[in-house]
Image (spheres, rainbow, N blue to C red):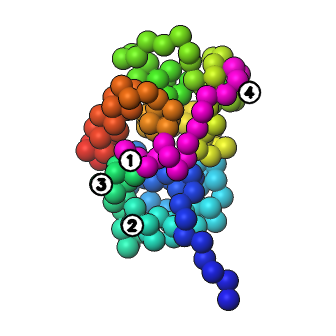
Amino acid sequence: MKTQNHQLKPQDIVFLLKLIVDNNPSWNQKPVSEALCMSQSEISQAVSRCKFAGLLAPDGKTVVKNSLFELLQYGLRFIFAQQPGPVVRGIPTAHSAEPLHQEIQSDEPFVWPYAHGTMRGHSIAPLYPSVPAAALKDPSLYEILALVDALRVGRSRERELALIHIKQRFDRQ
């Protein structure tokens, strides 16, 4: 008998954030998988892991926002840790992207490596390889993923501002 692994994966966070920004309680796997550039099986497995972790309600459709916010606030930078890498071409993230770009001035831009990117900066590996492509298709998803990267790699002030912005987005939905 095969034992199922219920440990969260980085794409689970991306999936949950997509559900929050879409705010559609009757979502379907196919459009979500296409929007995130993931397979439907990856979405199905994410649903299973997120339900097991208590981040998705038993109905499999509703994000438990308080639990997800606590995970982002207290655990994300430890379980999906990231350090800035070499300078590459890519898409701005963390404090280099909106909305933090207006509030934090930095000489060290952070980017997700992406061949068609518009900025050079220190590379930050996205939570999932398809994040840059998915973010370019959905500005709301892009903003919240950039804020999540600020939690992963930012200093304390950047993390505090990111949490404020994330909380505002969670409360809007």
Q: Which residue is mark 3?
A: 66
Gap in Å between the C-alphas at discs 1 and 3? Answer: 12 Å
Q: Amino acid at mark 2?
A: Gly
Residue 78 on the magenta span: yes
Q: Amino acid at mark 1?
A: Tyr
10 Å neighbourhood of mark 4: few (<14), some, or many (≥20)?
few
Q: Are marks 2 and 3 in contact (CB under 8 Å)?
A: no
Q: Looking at the image, tell me whether mark 2 or mark 4 is earlier in sequence order.
A: 2
Horizontal relation, residue 78 to residue 126: left or right: left
Gap in Å between the C-alphas at discs 4 and 1? Answer: 33 Å
10 Å neighbourhood of mark 3: few (<14), some, or many (≥20)?
few
Q: Amino acid at mark 4?
A: Ala
Front position among marks 1 and 2: 1
Front position among marks 2 and 4: 2
Q: Which residue is mark 2?
A: 54
| Visible residue check, residue 146 | no
Q: Amino acid at mark 3?
A: Asn
10 Å neighbourhood of mark 2: few (<14), some, or many (≥20)?
few
Q: Quadrant of residue 66?
A: bottom left
Horizontal relation, residue 99 to residue 2: left or right: left
Name the residue nearer the viewer: 4 or 139.
Answer: 4
Q: Looking at the image, tell me whether mark 1 or mark 3 is earlier in sequence order.
A: 3
Q: Which residue is mark 1?
A: 74
- Residue 95, horizontal then vertical, whole percent: 47, 23
Gap in Å between the C-alphas at discs 2 and 3? Answer: 10 Å
Height in image: 162 above or below 69? above
Quarter of the image with the N terminus is bottom right
Range shown magenta: 72-88
The count of marks equals: 4
Gap in Å between the C-alphas at discs 1 and 2? Answer: 16 Å
